[in-house]
Image (spheres, coloured by chain):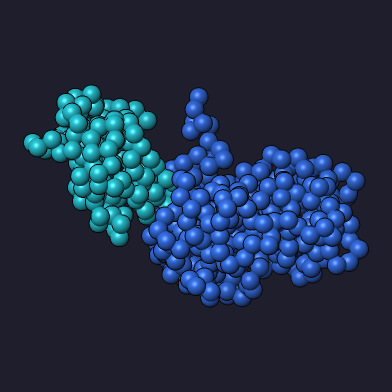
Amino acid sequence: MKDVPGDMFYTESHEWVKMDDDGIATIGISDHAQGQLGDVVYVELPQVGDAFTAGDPCAVVESVKAASDIYAPIGGEVVEINEQLESAPETINDDAYGEGWLFRLKADDASEVDGLMSAESYVEVNSED
Amino acid sequence: MTSKEMASKTPFYQAHVDAGARMVDFGGWDLPINYGSQIDEHHIVRQAAGMFDVSHMTVVEIKGNGARSFLSNLLANDIAKLQEPGKALYSCMLNPEGGIIDDLITYYLTETHFRMVVNAATHDKDMAWLEQQAAGFEVTVTERKDLAMLAVQGPEARQKTASILTAADAEGALALNIFQAAQIGDLFIARTGYTGEDGFEIMLPTDVAIDLWDKLLAAGVKPCGLGARDTLRLEAGMNLYGQDMNEATSPYVSGLAWTVALKDEREFIGRNALLAEKEAGPGKKLVGLVLEGRGVLRPHQNLVDETGEVIGETTSGSFSPTLEKAIAMARINRNVTGHSLVDIRGRKLPVRIVKMPFARKGSVCDGILG
């Protein structure tokens, strides 16, 4: 598996979360996930102001091959969406951990990330298959 | 044991892995879904030349004095149309109720030898059906497991293939008309395909298969996976068995009326059911859809009218790399024309009903983009 950033948290459903100091969480999908999906052609994002609890379906990433639901890794309110993905959804393939981020949440409880996987665990779980 | 360990490997397996393929289990065969980007592979076939390993497809020899009469009874299209050695015919074979058991291509080789290519996913039931129907005819039905198959497709496919053959063989290959085939050395070369582009489908002995692959690769033909094969055939308006048609759908509701030869008195399996359906008027039709806005069409999305009543369902759907829009095939009430609505996750989005194909020969067909 390609380098998995150590400063993020990961879910079993392949989302990543990066927390900043103000309790804002940036959310995307892993490079492993984009590789499985193939060419991404459409992204359905939540709206700013939408509120989710952890595990809620909140976005859809569609490749040529399939549609994949994205689940909120932690609870919070959407404060920003990556509008660039509307015209350039393939950014997720090109830079899953960077420019291909999906949306930002104001976390209800920043400590929720403690229940997620570290980069090390994520690599371990996904190298079994 | 997992299904992965069970999957059959084609003679090109190692070549796929070497080319960086992402392999998937496809009906019991280990095949490449893509080699990186299926969109890039799609464009290569529309614009240059790509090759697909289609060795999973089932090749069957029909031999004997009764070969022609057997096929005349078996197929909804009329084998009498094949009078010139090498010519090919696309047809469905039907059950007595007029449902499609499979779609296939038959090549006329000699009066006592026809060759048939049927789908891989339907292998077991097709072979059983052929054996069952062969009883009573002076004919043998034999599967050719010793043949590999490679489809070379795209506007440069024929020239690039010719470039790796001897001068005499190249001349023979380039002389083939559309839907015509010939045995040229080790290669059985047919000018057929499943992409909407010109090109060849080549059958050859498994032990020399990799040699052909390597030469084509060196000639600049790019390996393409099942992903691109599916978007190419969808743009070309070609049905996929099991998805756009099955044993519960007749050719009339599958956009295949043109493959049914009813004109003369020829008896064939399913004829009476088709006559009855034609008399009553088929209730549905298979159409093309183009999504007006953003999103992706997928199989099994409902089509609804303004009141929300379901009037049809998509059978295949994907993002079209050539149109850069979502397209689909859908089975819909026959009286619906012009526009409809598709239900995507509860949202009702407008789709335009179009006459297929969507794209072929490198570009979008007339009337598709409105």
Q: Position of residue B119 (x, y in %)?
A: 64, 49
Q: Is residue B70 left or right of residue A86?
A: right
Give the colour chain A carries in the figure: cyan
Q: Is residue A33 above or below residue B357?
A: above
Residue at coordinates 56% horizontally, 50% vertically from top-left?
A: B308
Q: Residue at x 47, y 56 (%)?
A: B349
**Apparent side of residue B172 relative to residue B61 in the rendered image (left or right):** left
Q: Is residue A16 above or below residue A86?
A: above
**Does residue B9 appear in this view?**
no
Residue B314 appears at what percent x and percent y? 57, 52
Outermost residue on the front side: it is: B307
x, y percent for residue A44? 35, 49
Tell me where residue B85 sits by quadrant. bottom right
Q: Residue at x 27, y 38 (%)?
A: A51
Which colour denotes chain B?
blue
In the displayed structure image, the side of residue A123 where residue B147 appears, left or right = right
